[in-house]
Image: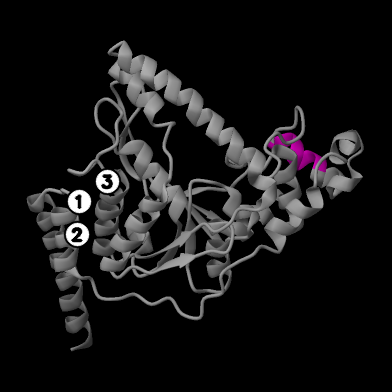
Amino acid sequence: MGLKLKQLIVREKTNLEFFASKVVAIDAYNAIYQFLAIIRGPDGSYLSDSNGRVTSHLSGLFYRNIRFLSIGIKPVYVFDGKPPSLKSVEIERRRQIKRDATIKYEKAISQGNLQDARKYAQQTSVMKDTMVEDSKKILSLFGIPYIDAPSEGESTAAHLTKTGQAYATASQDFDSVLFGAKRLVRNFSNSGRRKIPNRNTYIEIVPEIIDYEKTLKELGVTREQIVDIGILIGTDFNPDGFPRIGPKTALKMIKEHSKLEKIPQIQDKLSEVDYEQIRRIFLEPKVAHVSEIKFETINFDAIIKYLVDERSFSFDRVQTSLNRLKKSIERKSQTLEKWFS
């Protein structure tokens, strides 16, 4: 579902170059789902290799990380672990959306309506174990570290920013704010020129950075209170939220009454929500404790072998992109040598 905090959050536009030399902890599942949704054929089908295995996620990870590394960004990907039991309702809701979209997709295909087919296909993306293994393999070949979180990937990514091991966390969801990420970057993995659905026009999507302390100060709330605002609106752990309460109303209620237990008009509904456990999920999250984030050397030959020989990528396109990355790294190395000489 994703937390609907957009109306309240203080966002500042930036660009990828701003993150040069900075470590950014990326919500891996969030990024991969974006690639699975966006990188598809004209009829909405996934890209696949000669054996029918999906490669949309690999294509996204390959080209996006070429961009990151060329700029000098240091990405680290954080993969979800076991979700909290309270997330089961939201997980089932998402499955139903995919089932409904699949029916609409098949109908559009049967009618030859490729535009609608592609639109509905983007809502059917499913993460399979093999995709996670594929993703970790290509990251390893790039020398990019990844972390397996014990629970929500966003909570571990946020923790890395709080310990100073990462400058920011990257995700499309605002949940990272409730997990206390010092900085959240949106549009990090999908920035660039995008076509508006059903219109022959394009827009430029740019990264947005959200500073946690600035947001709390601007809203005039505490860490605990912004979590309560999230619960009122609806989180992945109580997706329906509270009836007729949007972001602005939630903020007003919390500023007036300080916390959920003191808001008179929600007490009947509040008794049906395990709000204390939801608070603990955000305020005392299960996280992976990492002593060191280590970046390895890029294995250019192994990347070509894996993508071209095993996954049917174009040799020319892969080699051209890798050569561009090599030249970028060489230029940066030469600049450093001149600086210290």
Give the residue at mark 3. 55
Q: Are marks 1 and 3 in contact (CB under 8 Å)?
A: yes
Residue in the picture at 68% in, 50% down: 85
Q: As rendered, which of 210 and 286 lies closer to the eye?
A: 286
Residue in the picture at 68% in, 57% down: 282
The mark total stands at 3
Q: As rendered, which of 234 and 166 lies closer to the eye?
A: 234
Q: Are marks 2 and 1 in contact (CB under 8 Å)?
A: yes
User: Where 193 sits versus 310, above or below?
Assistant: above
Instruction: Please state which amino acid type lies under the numbered disc 3.
Output: Thr
Residue in the picture at 31% in, 28% down: 44
Q: Secondary structure at mark 2?
A: helix
Instruction: Please state which amino acid type lies under the numbered disc 1.
Output: Arg
Quadrant that contains the C terminus: bottom left
Q: CA distance from mark 2 to mark 3?
A: 12 Å
Q: Secondary structure at mark 3?
A: loop
Disc with the residue nearer the chain's start (2 vs 3): 3
As drawn, the label of residue 311 is: 1
Q: CA distance from mark 1 to mark 3?
A: 7 Å
For the record, the magenta segment spans: 247-253
**Residue 123 point in image, percent of width and height:** 44, 31
- Callout 3 environment at 10 Å: few (<14), some (14 to 19), or many (20+)? many
Disc with the residue nearer the chain's start (2 vs 1): 2
Give the residue at mark 2. 306
**Residue 220 visible here:** no
**Residue 49 point in image, percent of width and height:** 20, 44
Quadrant that contains the N terminus: top right
Q: CA distance from mark 2 to mark 1?
A: 6 Å
Does the magenta-highlighted stretch encompass residue 13? no
- Callout 1 environment at 10 Å: few (<14), some (14 to 19), or many (20+)? some
